[in-house]
Every structure is written in structure tokens, then in C-alpha cells.
């Protein structure tokens, strides 16, 4: 076990080196703008005016290193909000201005903010190893760690100041705490789970889904294990009180610098300007905020309901545009954004599992006594397997059937650590399959597959965000199927500027917007800020204007290019003609798999 732990730490340290090296030239991504500026505002000024759409914990974390830098106060940039712009939309401009208009270079600020994100990714890797070793053994833990450090999802998003990898850490920590409570049903374990659950709720609003999941599973487990009802209620009460207290105190702290009257006015105006269609469903939050002691709860529910009641999320899939979701989106993303060797491994262990279950069924049938033995109080491996399996199914059902739209497969990240744990356990069992020469062949095959997985992923270094499986064409073909945070999130702007300088190009137009047309509706302009392009390209930057014929060099970010060529989906569709003229043109180059450069 000691040697396995040292090997796992070595693998995670190597992963951290890869992430640090690859992220140094990644420009600030769209969501990171908001995360860093809002985080500095919350941590240093305790003024929760913008960024209410998510809890503050991870913003605080990424802003912690910035507290040691001599930066302009974040509130200074809040004064620049146009009178007509609501707080939710302005938050991205605010974050961008905070980053680009400091005396420190934005690269230094961004790198400092990304270091805590990398520490979170390493913490998740350590917890992954520990949890797997605890229930399935050291060898399974090493397999799971190997899959983790070579995962394009974690190599890409573990370096960025976003909430996806922290959400995965929150989920795995909550499942680990829950299993500890099952194994040792004592008050101290309930307190621990309460602290973990409270922290998880402070990471991201979708973590609320942990509450019904753990509640139902705990009731089922307690009944099956004959736990006294009084003990069950005592544990429920402890978990609820501890998690609620942590949530309340954290929100209270971040509202200290936010005047009460201003808070009420902002909630009311923002609901009316951005959620007018559901404003009546949110008026109770405004009434709650009228009481000083209830402001922390009101602000939490303000953000939670803001997310829950949103509709019409802008999405792109297989060349189609839609304001609704596609049922196959996340399953396709799971198999297209993971390496081919891992897909082969999943297929093999699934077939082996079905074969073994079929054999057991034919020999003995599926007996209730066998299931009870598998879920006995002493069989924590059985409970761990059930817990991880049910979470994967539960969260996938939410994503596939209840999600408002599809804007990126990064939302799969909370199911990946449990999936890796179960895959590691299956690989460990498969390692001992057969005898003699057949065992050697099996072990050799597994070693080859894991080696190929690492080669498949690390060959795209440093462009992990646009990773895509080779059997579907690799990163350059990814945008045929997926776009947005799966391909281009603004991460390659600095690399574009370096390429332009190397090529001696004096002027290049950059497209930062397009026009989309809802089926049956009028054209709608859609534009991102061009501040980061202006910053890195300097005098070489020229804004692209679709109103006149373009000549010379043109750079089109992947999102803009594919959105500007989208066909309408059957349900709630939208389409665009903005960049159809580029469909039959070959780009001179594709920067990082995410920015297409043409010479016209």
C-alpha cells in the first residue's frame, strides 16, 4: 500500500507539471473572467453584487493568491456598468476589465488564480486514490489514478478557474463521507458529512442534487441494515444543521459590504430585466431579503432559482442550433471526448461483467440472500459499488432529461471520478483473469491500452481543451459535432497573436460575433467582447465587419465559425448564414484546434 501511494503521488505530481506547463499560454477563458473578478470582490470587499449565479467558495479560493498582489479594488470596475445593462450580463465585462486593466500583467494574475485550481485537481486525485484503495484495494486505486492523470477532461479543466473539477471533488467527498457514516453510524461521522455537504453546496448550485440522492440512499441503507429510526433522525438532524450553518455563515460573511437597500433594489431590478417571464415565481425571494437576518438565505435562493428557472440555453450539436437539449448529447460527449483505449476498456469490462452475471444467473439464479450478503453491514465494497453506480445513473438522468440545454460536456465531470473508481476496480479484477499464458496476454493487453491512452491524450499537449477522439477526426474535426467549451473557450488568443507575429502579418480581422435567426423569428446579433484580442494583437487587430466583403487575413474562433454555419434543429431551432461563405474554404491553419485562420 505504501509503494502504491508513493506511485500515485508521483503520477499526480507529473500531472501538475503537465497542467502548469500547458496552461501558461492559455488565455483567460470566458468563465474565468467572471470567476477572478468576482472572487476578488467577494474575498477582499465582501460585496456580493455580481456573480450571484453561483456560490462563493471557489471564487474565494481562486482569488486567495491575488490578495497578496497589489491590485486595484474590484469595486472600482463596477462603476462602469451601463445603465441599461443588468448585473448578470455585466459580470463578464466587469471581470474582463478587472483582469486587463491592472498594473500587473494579466498573465501573472491569471496564473496566480489558476494555481489553487490545480491544487483542487491534485486533491481530487488524492481522494480518488484513497477512496478506491479503501474499498477496492491498492492496485485498483493505481489503475483509477492512471485513468485520472491521463483524462483529457481533468487535464483540460483541472487547470482552469472554473467550478467543474471542484464539483467533482465535492461529489466524491460527499460520497466518501456518506460511506463512512454507513460504516460507522456515529454522530461524529454525521458531523463530518454535514461539513462536506455544506461545502459542496457552496461550490456550485447543481450540487443541491446531492441532497435527495443521499437522503433516499441513506434511508434505504438504514432500513436494510436495521438502524433504529431514532438514530436515523439524529443523523439527519446533525447533517442538516451543520450544512445549513456553514452555508448561512459563508453567505452572511460575503454580504457584509453589501448595503441592505442596495441589495433589495438589485434583486428586484435584475429579476425584472433578466427573468421577467418567471419574475412572479421569484418574488418570495425579495420578501425574504427584506429581513436582515434572512438575507444570506435570500441570496442563496436568488442564485439557485436563477439557475433552476432558466430556459432556452443556446446550444450546438452535429451542426444544428437549438434552444433545447438533445438526449444523446452527453452520452456522445462521454465517448467522443475520452480516448479510444478507455472506450475499449469500458467495452471489455462491461462484456466480462455481463458474462459473469449471466453465468451466476444460470447456475444459481438471482437470490435475495445473495443481494443481502452483497449489501451486508460488513460488505462496504458492495455498498461503495452501489453508491457509485447509482450516482452515475442519477446524475446522467438529470443531465439528459432535466437539463435546460447543452453548452458543453464538461458538465459530465462530476460523474467521472466514480466511473474511474469502478473502472479501476474492474481492471484490478481483470489483472488476475486466467492463468499462465492467458494471464500474461491479458496483462500485456491492459498495459498496452493504458499506454495508448496516455499517448492519445498527451499528443495534443498543450491543447487539452479541444481534445477529441481520433476515430472521429481528432481536434480539427471536433467542431463538426461539438463546439463551445468542448473546443474553443477563448484559450488560444495569445497563441494566435504569437502566430500572427511569427508570420509577419501586419493586420488581421477577427470575428467576435455573428447573427442567428430563431425559426420563425427575426435575426438576433450575438457578440463577445473583443478586449482580449485587442490586448494581445495590438495594432494588428481589426474588427471583422460582416457588412462588407472581407479581404486579407481573417481569424474566426471555433464557436463563432460553427454557430455562424448552424442549421436549425427540429425542436426550438435556430440557424445562421453569417459564415456560410467559409464552408468550402480551407483554413491556412487552426490555432490550438480552436481558432480558424483564413486568407481571403
Image (tube, rainbow, N blue to C red):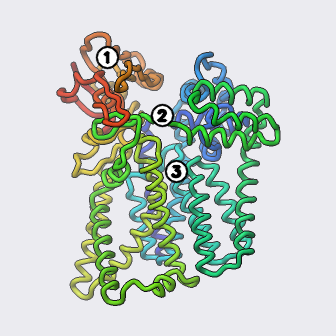
Label 3: element kind:
helix
**Horizontal side of residue 66 vs 475, given as left or right:** right
Q: Which mark is residue 369?
A: none
- Residue identifier under label 2: 30
- Residue identifier under label 1: 506
Up the image or down, 276 lies above or below 213; here it is: above
Q: State the image coordinates of residue 338 (x, y, percent, origin top left).
A: 33, 55
Label 2: element kind:
helix
The structure residue drawn at horizontal position 73% and vertical position 44%, both measured from the top left corner, is 297
The structure residue drawn at horizontal position 28% and vertical position 43%, both measured from the top left corner, is 475
Inter-mark Cα distance, 3 to 1:
37 Å
**Horizontal side of residue 82 vs 192, given as left or right:** left
Q: Quadrant of residue 300?
A: top right
- First in sequence: mark 3 vs mark 2: 2
The structure residue drawn at horizontal position 49% and vertical position 62%, both measured from the top left corner, is 391
- Residue identifier under label 3: 118
- First in sequence: mark 3 vs mark 1: 3
Up the image or down, 285 lies above or below 468; here it is: above
Residue 440 in sight here: yes
- First in sequence: mark 2 vs mark 1: 2
Q: State the image coordinates of residue 89 (x, y, percent, origin top left).
A: 55, 27
- Dot in front, 3 or 1: 3
Label 1: element kind:
loop
Residue 99 in sight here: no
Up the image or down, 548 lies above or below 515; here it is: above
Amino acid at each position: 500500500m505504501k509503494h502504491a501511494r508513493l506511485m500515485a503521488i508521483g503520477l499526480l505530481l507529473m500531472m501538475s507539471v503537465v497542467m502548469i506547463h500547458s496552461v501558461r499560454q492559455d488565455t483567460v477563458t470566458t468563465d474565468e473572467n467572471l470567476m477572478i473578478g468576482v472572487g476578488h470582490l467577494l474575498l477582499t470587499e465582501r460585496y456580493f453584487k455580481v456573480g450571484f449565479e453561483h456560490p462563493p467558495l471557489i471564487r474565494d479560493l481562486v482569488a486567495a493568491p491575488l490578495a497578496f498582489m497589489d491590485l486595484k479594488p474590484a469595486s472600482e470596475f463596477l462603476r462602469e456598468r451601463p445603465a441599461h445593462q443588468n448585473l448578470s450580463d455585466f459580470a463578464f465585462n466587469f471581470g474582463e476589465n478587472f483582469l486587463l486593466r491592472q498594473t500587473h500583467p494579466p498573465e501573472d494574475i491569471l496564473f496566480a488564480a489558476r494555481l489553487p485550481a490545480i491544487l483542487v485537481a491534485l486533491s481530487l486525485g488524492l481522494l480518488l486514490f484513497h477512496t478506491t484503495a479503501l474499498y477496492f484495494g491498492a492496485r485498483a486505486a493505481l489503475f483509477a489514478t492512471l485513468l485520472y492523470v491521463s483524462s483529457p477532461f481533468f487535464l483540460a479543466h483541472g487547470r482552469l478557474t472554473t467550478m467543474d473539477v471542484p464539483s467533482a471533488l465535492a461529489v466524491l467527498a460527499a460520497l466518501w463521507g456518506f460511506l463512512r457514516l454507513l460504516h460507522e453510524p456515529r454522530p461524529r461521522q454525521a458531523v463530518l458529512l454535514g461539513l462536506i455537504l455544506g461545502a459542496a453546496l457552496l461550490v456550485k448550485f447543481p450540487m443541491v442534487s446531492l441532497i435527495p440522492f443521499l437522503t433516499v440512499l441513506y434511508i434505504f441503507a438504514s432500513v436494510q441494515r436495521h438502524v433504529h429510526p431514532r438514530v436515523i433522525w439524529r443523523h439527519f438532524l446533525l447533517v442538516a444543521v451543520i450544512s445549513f450553518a456553514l452555508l448561512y455563515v459563508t453567505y452572511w460573511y460575503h454580504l457584509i459590504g453589501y448595503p441592505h437597500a442596495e441589495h433589495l433594489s438589485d434583486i428586484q431590478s435584475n429579476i425584472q430585466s433578466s427573468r421577467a417571464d418567471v419574475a412572479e415565481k421569484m418574488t418570495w425571494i425579495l420578501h425574504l431579503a427584506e429581513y436582515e437576518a434572512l438575507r444570506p438565505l435570500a441570496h442563496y435562493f436568488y442564485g439557485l432559482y436563477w439557475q433552476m428557472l432558466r430556459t432556452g440555453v443556446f446550444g450546438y450539436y452535429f451542426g444544428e442550433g437549438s434552444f433545447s437539449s438533445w438526449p444523446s448529447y452527453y452520452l456522445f460527449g462521454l465517448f467522443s471526448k475520452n480516448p479510444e483505449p478507455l472506450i475499449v476498456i469500458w467495452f471489455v469490462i462491461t462484456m466480462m461483467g455481463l458474462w459473469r452475471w449471466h453465468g451466476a444467473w444460470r447456475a444459481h439464479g438471482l437470490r435475495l440472500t445473495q443481494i443481502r450478503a452483497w449489501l451486508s453491514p460488513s460488505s462496504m465494497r458492495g455498498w461503495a459499488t452501489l453508491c457509485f453506480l447509482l450516482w452515475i445513473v442519477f446524475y446522467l438522468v438529470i443531465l439528459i432529461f432535466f437539463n435546460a440545454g447543452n453548452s458543453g460536456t464538461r458538465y459530465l465531470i462530476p460523474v467521472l471520478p466514480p466511473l474511474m473508481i469502478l473502472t479501476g476496480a474492474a481492471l484490478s479484477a481483470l489483472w488476475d483473469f486466467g492463468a499462465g499464458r492467458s494471464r500474461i496476454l491479458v496483462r500485456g493487453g491492459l498495459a498496452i491500452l493504458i499506454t495508448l491512452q496516455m499517448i492519445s491524450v498527451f499528443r495534443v499537449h498543450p491543447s487539452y481543451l479541444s481534445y477529441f477522439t481520433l476515430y472521429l477526426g481528432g481536434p480539427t474535426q471536433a467542431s463538426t459535432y461539438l463546439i463551445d467549451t468542448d473546443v474553443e473557450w477563448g484559450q488560444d488568443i495569445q497563441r494566435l497573436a504569437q502566430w500572427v507575429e511569427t508570420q509577419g502579418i501586419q493586420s488581421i480581422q477577427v470575428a467576435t460575433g455573428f447573427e442567428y435567426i430563431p425559426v420563425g423569428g427575426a435575426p438576433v446579433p450575438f457578440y463577445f467582447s473583443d478586449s482580449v484580442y485587442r490586448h494581445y494583437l495590438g495594432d494588428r487587430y481589426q474588427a471583422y465587419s460582416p457588412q462588407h466583403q472581407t479581404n486579407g487575413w481573417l481569424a474566426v474562433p471555433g464557436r463563432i465559425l460553427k454557430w455562424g454555419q448552424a442549421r436549425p434543429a427540429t425542436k426550438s431551432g435556430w440557424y445562421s448564414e453569417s459564415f456560410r461563405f467559409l464552408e468550402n474554404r480551407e483554413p491556412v491553419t487552426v490555432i490550438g484546434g480552436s481558432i480558424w485562420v483564413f486568407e481571403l
